[in-house]
Amino acid sequence: MPLANKEKPPILRQPRRLMMIVGAILALLFVVYLATAATGFLRTQTKVADPRMTGTEAPLERAM
């Protein structure tokens, strides 16, 4: 049977529906990406610098 005469699956008969599903999945991934970026940004903004990590008293120099 030639491919042109084969019956299409229901999702391919309505291309707009397929685009809506793909768009919804992409939107969900984008929201997860933004939430991850915001979490990382806010964690670095609220972190107080540890004074022991700078200068001559850095942990690497103390370990030697």
Image (tube, rainbow, N blue to C red):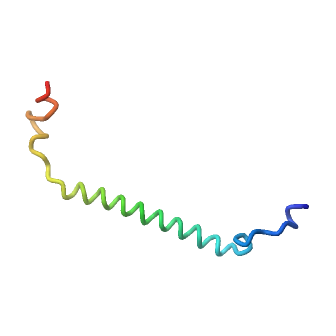
Find residue 44 and report its horizontal and vertical position in percent.
23, 54
Is 27 on the left or on the right of 62, as rendered? right
Q: Residue 61's spot in the image, x, y percent?
A: 13, 29
The answer to whether residue 19 is above or below residue 45 is below
Q: Observer-nearest residue: 45 or 7?
A: 7
As drawn, is 8 to the left or to the right of 22? right
Residue placed furthest toward the right: 1
- Give the residue displayed 48% in from the left and 67% down from the top: 28
Quarter of the figure that contains the C terminus: top left
Q: Is residue 7 above or below residue 60?
A: below
Q: Position of residue 38 (x, y in %)?
A: 32, 61
Which of these two is toward me, 34 or 7?
Answer: 7
Q: Is residue 58 left or right of residue 13?
A: left
Q: Count the marks: how many? A: 0
Quarter occupied by residue 63: top left
Measured as percent of width and height from the top left, residue 31 is found at 42, 66
| Drawn side of residue 14 relative to residue 40, left or right | right
Q: Residue at x 36, y 63 (%)?
A: 35
At 86% across and 65% down in the image, what residue appears? 4
| The N terminus lies in quadrant | bottom right
